[in-house]
Image (cartoon, rainbow, N blue to C red):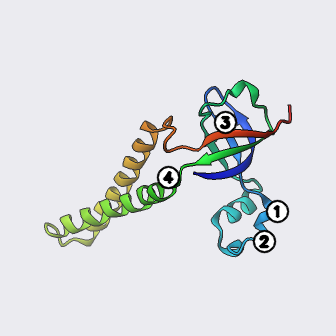
Amino acid sequence: MIHETGTVVSIQENELWVETIQQSTCQTCVAEKGCGQRLIAKATGRTTAIRVLPGLFDLKKVHMHDKVVIGIPEKVIVTGTLLTYFLPLTVMVLAVLFIDRFSANDIITALIAIIALCTGGLIVRIYSYLNRNNNEIHPILLEQTYSAG
């Protein structure tokens, strides 16, 4: 499990939103110029927040701006990346290969490619929705390191 320190930015009924990017470490990171998270934070003036499930932790003890440690299962990084990027592209390529046998029209092929890519994205979205409360694939709260409240 990968451990990450962050700050609680929102508390909801059965979840927390934790801001994990630390601007001070962005300055020293080797990927500084090519990091997408840094570019988004710079453009919007905000850092990104991660939805965190409470795990075995009592959310009544957590307050806004508390420093917490979250755990991200290692398999989530690999499987999440494959699912998010590889599945829609695979669906698109297979659909294009299939439709290419029946149609020589490039417009139809391009249209099918777009529809298939969106379908792959929809499959990912449905999978994500169905697993939204699964502790095995979502970050969970491990400990509260500093209480602001």
What's the CA distance linking mark 3 and mark 2? 28 Å
Residue 76: image tag = 4
- N-terminal label among 3 and 2: 3
State if disc 1 and disc 2 touch (CB < 8 Å): yes
Q: Please name whichever residue, 1 or 94, is drawn nearer the observer in this view of the structure.
A: 1
Out of 13 and 118, give the one closest to the viewer: 13
First in residue order: circle 4 vs circle 2: 2
Looking at the picture, which amino acid does disc 4 mark? Val
**Label 1, label 3: how far apart the Cα atoms are:** 23 Å
Q: Amino acid at mark 3?
A: Leu
Counting labels gives 4
In-image side of 45 versus 74 (left or right): right
Residue in the image at 54% along x and 49% along y: 73
Residue 24 numbered mark, or none = 1
Q: Earlier in the sequence, mark 1 or mark 4?
A: 1
The residue type indicated by label 1 comes to Ser
x, y percent for residue 15: 62, 33
Label 4: few (<14), some or many (≥20) within 10 Å? some
Q: Residue at x 65, y 68 (%)?
A: 35
Which of the 4 image quarters holds residue 41?
bottom right
**Residue at the right extreme, as displayed:** 148
Q: Name the residue type under label 2.
A: Thr
Q: Are discs 1 and 3 less than 8 Å apart at CB?
A: no
* Residue 28 marker: 2
- Say whether disc 1 or disc 3 marks the residue closer to the N-terminus: 3
Q: Residue at x 66, y 36 (%)?
A: 16
Mark 1 vs mark 4, foreground winner is 4
**Earlier sequence position, callout 4 versus callout 3:** 3
Task: From the image, tell me which residue sits under label 3.
Answer: 16
